[in-house]
Amino acid sequence: MWLYYALIGPPFWALVNILDSHCVGNVFDRPWVGVITGSLATAVIFLAFPFILPFIEWQFPHWRIIALSIVAGGLIQLSQAFYFQALERTEAGIVAAYENFTPTLMPLASYFLMGEVLEPWHYIAIGVLVVASLCFCLIDISRDGKWDSILLMMVTSSLQVAAILIEKYVFEHGDFIICFLLIISGVVLSGVLPLLFSSNVRKIFIGNIPKLKPLTGLFIGLECANLVALYLSQKAVDLGSPALSAAMETTVPGYTFLITVALLYFKHHYGDEDAKYRLRTKLILVAIMSVGVAQIA
C-alpha cells in the first residue's frame, strides 16, 4: 500500500518545484521569502481545520512525540531555506534531480540508526539512481560550474533524511493524522519565527509585499499542493520503509522536466528555457531512473 502513496506524491512535488522556481526568479526579493510565504499560506489553510475537527479522533501522544513532531517540521522548513537558495542558482528540474541525494543517504542512515537492511537488488537500484543523479549534476556543472547548488541540495537532503527518520519514529508511537498536523505546525512555526524576531527580515518582507499581494491565491494553491505532497510522502513512510519511500521520489525530475517543457508551450510565463538544455540527455537519464524505480518496486 505504501507504494501507491509513494508514486502519487512526485507529480505534486514536481508542480511545487516549478512554481517555486518561478517565484524565486520573478517574485521574491530574496529566495528565503518563499519560506515565509509558505508558512503564512499554510496558516491560512489551517483556518479550515475547525470544519474537519469533528471527524478526527483526538488522542494526543506523549509530550516527547509532540516535541519530536515539531522538530521534524522545523527540519523540513530549514531544508526548504537551502532548497530555495538552490533554486536561485539553477533550474527546477536540476534541483529536483539533486533531491535524489536523499534516497542515497537514507539507506545508510536507516542501517546505522535503525538497523534496516534492504535486499541486494534494492541497493543496486539505488546505485542506478545515484549514477543518474550524478549525470544530472555533470550537465549542470558543465554549463556554469554550479557546485554551490549541489552543496546546498546536499545540506537539504541531509536535513530531509533526519526529518524522515524522526517522522518514522513518531508515526510508530502516535496516531498518523495527529502527528502529521503537529509536524505541519512545526513547519509553520519555524517559518514565521524569522519574521517575528528579525527586523531585517521584516523589512525585506514588507518591501516585497507589493509583488506578493496580487499572488496570494497562487501561494495558497501552491501550499495546498505542497501539503498534499507532504501527506502522501509521510503516509508512505508511515506504512513502509523510509529508504524505499525516499527512493520512489526520484521520479520527481521526470515529472518536473515534462511539466516544465509543457508549460513552455502552453503557459510560457511559468516555463523555464533552461529545461531545453540537453533535453534529450535529461530524458534518457529520467528513463534510467525509471528502471531503478521499477527495480525497487
Image (spheres, rainbow, N blue to C red):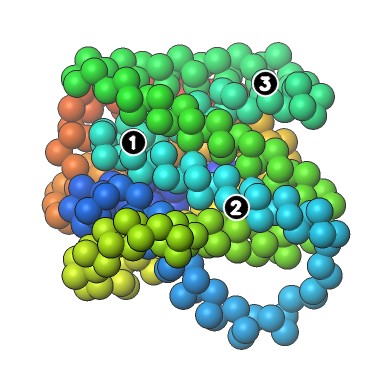
The earlier-in-sequence mark between 1 and 2 is: 2
Say which of 267 and 42 sits in front.
Answer: 42
The earlier-in-sequence mark between 1 and 3 is: 1
Say which of 80 and 127 sits in front.
Answer: 80
The crowd level at tag 2 (other Cα within 10 Å; few <14, some 14-19, many 20+) is many
Label 2 sits on a secondary structure element that is helix
The crowd level at tag 3 (other Cα within 10 Å; few <14, some 14-19, many 20+) is some
Say which of 159 and 91 sits in front.
Answer: 159
**Residue 258 visible, this orientation:** no
Taking the spot 36% from the left edge, 16% from the top edge, the residue there is: 135
Is label 2 or label 3 in front?
Answer: 2
Q: Is residue 77 above or below residue 297?
A: below
**Residue 96 visible, this orientation:** yes
Q: Is residue 225 above or below residue 24?
A: below
In the image, which disc is placed on residue 86?
1
Taking the spot 48% from the left edge, 35% from the top edge, the residue there is: 156
Mark 1–mark 2 distance (CA, rounded to whole Å): 20 Å
The crowd level at tag 1 (other Cα within 10 Å; few <14, some 14-19, many 20+) is many
Label 3: which residue? 108
Mark 1–mark 3 distance (CA, rounded to whole Å): 24 Å
In the image, which disc is placed on residue 73?
2
Say whether residue 55 is left or right of residue 11. right
**Residue 4 pos. (x, y %):** 62, 47
Label 3 sits on a secondary structure element that is helix
Count of numbered badges drawn on the protein? 3
Say whether residue 185 is left or right of residue 20. right
**Residue 29 pos. (x, y %):** 22, 53
**Residue 182 pos. (x, y %):** 67, 62
The kind of residue tagged 3 is Leu
